[in-house]
Amino acid sequence: MYHLTALVTLLAILFYFFTSINVSRSRTKTGIKVPAVSGHPDFERAFRIQMNTLEWMPIFLPSLWLFAIYISDAGAAAIGAVWIVGRIVYFIGYSKAAAKRGPGFAIQGIASIVLWAGAVGAMVLQLV
């Protein structure tokens, strides 16, 4: 069973839900009405945090699960937790200023690459 990977998946979805709520709160705070996606820098940063998280989830989640299946549930969960920490660091930095998003982006990007490369490597080894 993949209990730890399932837990990390739920935490990643919870974080995405949090970013969605943050966009809604930012709309209220800045007065940006639906369907507008621009108009106030604070709102635009909140919106980009949510969208960037959404853009990375189709890379992260399959890589997470393939790593768990082919290598290790605990390993996938640990690296997945690093991805979530990276997204939190990204959220905190980008919320302050766009220029501060880099460290969090790097953390989550490296975690995703490790998951993907590990899964691909393990799959290739099983084929040969």
Image (cartoon, rainbow, N blue to C red):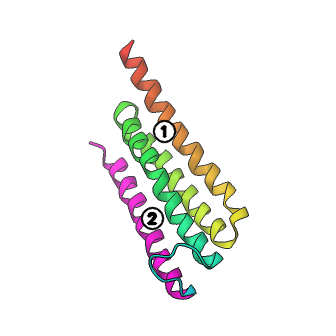
The Cα atoms of the two marked residues, 1 and 2, are separated by 19 Å
In this orientation, which residue lies closer to the viewer: 14 or 99? 99
What type is the residue that disc 2 sits on?
Phe
Q: Residue at x 48, y 69 (%)?
A: 19
| SS for dot 2 | helix
Q: Left or right? Give the position of 84 relative to 66.
A: right
What type is the residue that disc 1 sits on?
Leu
Horizontal and vertical percent position of residue 111: 55, 44
Horizontal and vertical percent position of residue 124: 42, 20
Q: Main secondary structure of the magenta part?
A: helix
- Disc 2 designates what residue? 15
Is residue 19 one of those drawn in magenta? Answer: yes
Q: Residue at x 45, y 64 (%)?
A: 15
Is residue 104 one of those drawn in magenta? Answer: no
Instruction: Give the total number of marks visible in the rendering.
Output: 2
Compared to 44, does 104 lie above or below? above
In magenta, the rendered stretch is 1-29
Label 2: few (<14), some (14–19) or many (≥20) C-alpha neighbours in 10 Å: some
| Residue that extends furthest to the front in the rendered view of this protein | 36
Compared to 117, does 14 lie above or below? below
- Disc 1 designates what residue? 115
Q: Left or right? Give the position of 46 relative to 127.
A: right
Q: Quadrant of the C terminus?
A: top left
Q: Residue at x 36, y 16 (%)?
A: 127
Horizontal and vertical percent position of residue 115: 48, 38
| Mark found first going from the N terminus, 1 or 2 | 2
